[in-house]
Image (spheres, rainbow, N blue to C red):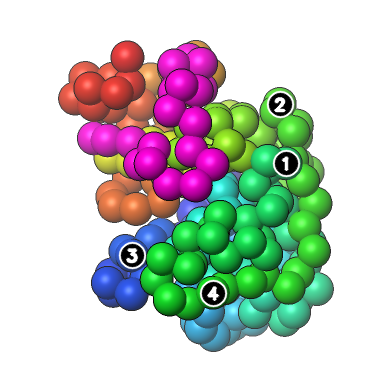
Amino acid sequence: MINVVPFIYEMVDELYANTYLLSDSENNCVVIDPAKDYPGIVNYIKKNNLKLKAVLLTHGHVDHMRGVDTLVNAFKAPLYIGFDDEDKLTDTYANCSDFLGEHVVVKSKAITLADNEFLHFLSEDIKVITVPYHTAGSVCFYLKESGVLFTGDFIIMHGIGRSDLPSAMPKGLRNSMAKVLALPDKTKIYGGHGPSSTLEIERRVNPFVK
């Protein structure tokens, strides 16, 4: 089983974004959506003798990638992002940092992801599920054996992400949601903001998960 460690940033300037560190029994780890540029995750990895194999982005908005370069530089780990969100790493309008007056640019080069691709960084494979809606290149990361799904801002507890930001694809919601709804009800959902949930709960209470 994969161990999931959430790093929750409950500060307005970080937009309450969540970062997740996944590790296996062999001390391999990946980090999903490093939201904040601070040494806490780097120190955690070093303190626990973990080996960072990759940094994974669910999408290219500023509040989910401020810490990318810090991690990549510290551990020489590769960066992955959905194909249609690669431009957001360097386009400050597209990644919404312009709206915050920050103008954030990620200097690390990324490898792009495709639908149904499998990533082999941990003892359990990570499946990439493309879910264009919140952004054109949004992806979810699914670990079948552990029964966990990292949804970024596609699904958050009792809701979904916005569809009025640059590159959003509101018309993609139905098809993207169908991919997620094909997963088992007991799948635990870790969103980009807020508490975790399960697909079973979201089917019952989330009006968008239909």
Q: CB atoms at circles 3 and 4 under 8 Å apart?
A: no
Q: In the picture, residue 139 is in which quadrant?
A: top right
Along the line of sight, which residue is nearer the eye, 1 or 210? 210
Q: CA distance from mark 4 to mark 1?
A: 22 Å
**Mark toward the viewer: 1 or 2:** 1
> Which segment is the magenta one?
158-178
On the picture, is 161 further left or further right than 43? Answer: left
Return the residue at label 4.
103
Return the residue at label 3.
15
Badge 1: few (under 14), some or many (20 or more) residues near its Cα, within 10 Å? some
Q: CA distance from mark 2 to mark 4?
A: 32 Å
Q: CA distance from mark 3 to mark 2?
A: 30 Å
User: Picture coordinates of residue 108 (x, y %)?
Assistant: 75, 69
Q: Secondary structure at mark 1?
A: helix
Return the residue at label 1.
83
On the picture, is 205 further left or further right than 139? Answer: left
Confirm whether residue 132 shows in the render. Answer: yes
Confirm whether residue 44 shows in the render. Answer: no
Q: Secondary structure at mark 3?
A: loop
Q: For the point 61% across and 30% down, which residue is it?
A: 129
